[in-house]
Image (cartoon, rainbow, N blue to C red):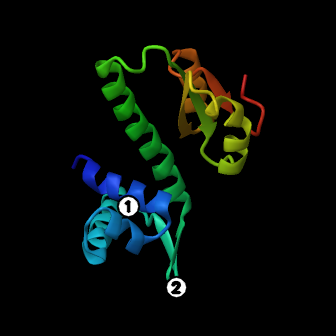
Amino acid sequence: MPLNYHHLRYFWAVAHDGNLTRTAQRLNLSQSALSVQIKQLEERLGHPLFDRRGRQLHLTEAGRIALDHADAIFATGQELIATLEGSERSRQALRVGALATLSRNFQIGFLRPMLARSDVEVILRSGSPTELLEGLATLNLDLVLMNREPPD
């Protein structure tokens, strides 16, 4: 069964807002409808994406991985629109791969100088060491962030 991108978009919005109620209001949905959409995505992926602690939502490890992919998917969609509209011609894409277990705070801190530039669009993808090095070898990634020495 293919991935439902509407479910992914709802998950992405909640993950960035950090609050189901606020996201539901912003998207003009009921909180229960939004919860059902995320639950369906969790069932499709086979992993819980949020750890619900009281009224707070915290991303699980699977949720962090899903968010990295969702960020890349939706950034690519925006890039497509911008490219076809001709507004992004002066921006360079920097495709960065990061080890899936690498701290997001470290990744953002390391990339902060590039994120501040208006002429560079940073596209961040996560993966295993093998996937990342393969991405470098096939020129699908420009830079890889890892906290261990790569295999020979």
Q: Is residue 111 left or right of residue 123?
A: right
Query: Which residue is drawn at the image coordinates 71% and 31% (left, top)?
Result: 113
Q: Where does residue 47 sit, x and y in percent of width and height?
A: 42, 63
Q: Determine the residue positioned at 39% across, 38% down.
A: 73
CA–CA distance in space, label 2 to label 1:
23 Å
- Compared across the picture, whether 38 is left or right of 126 comes to left
Q: Residue furthest bottom?
A: 54
Q: Please determine whether, in this image, residue 124 is positioned above or below residue 121.
A: below
Secondary structure state at the residue bearing disc 2 = loop
Q: Is residue 59 above or below residue 115?
A: below
Q: Nearer the viewer, mark 2 or mark 1?
A: 2
Residue behind mark 1: 46
Q: Is residue 4 visible?
A: no
Q: Earlier in the sequence, mark 2 or mark 1?
A: 1
- Neighbour class for label 2 at 10 Å: few (<14), some, many (≥20)? few
Indicate which disc residue 2 carries. Answer: none
Residue 23 visible:
yes
Name the spot of residue 140 as percent of width and height, x first: 50, 20
Spot occupied by residue 40 in the image (x, y as percentages of width and height): 28, 64
As rendered, which of 120 and 107 lies closer to the eye?
Answer: 120
**Which residue is label 2 attached to?**
54
Asked if residue 75 is positioned above or below residue 121 in the image, the reply reads below
Q: Is residue 143 left or right of residue 47?
A: right
Q: Split into 4 quadrants, where in the image is the C terminus?
A: top right
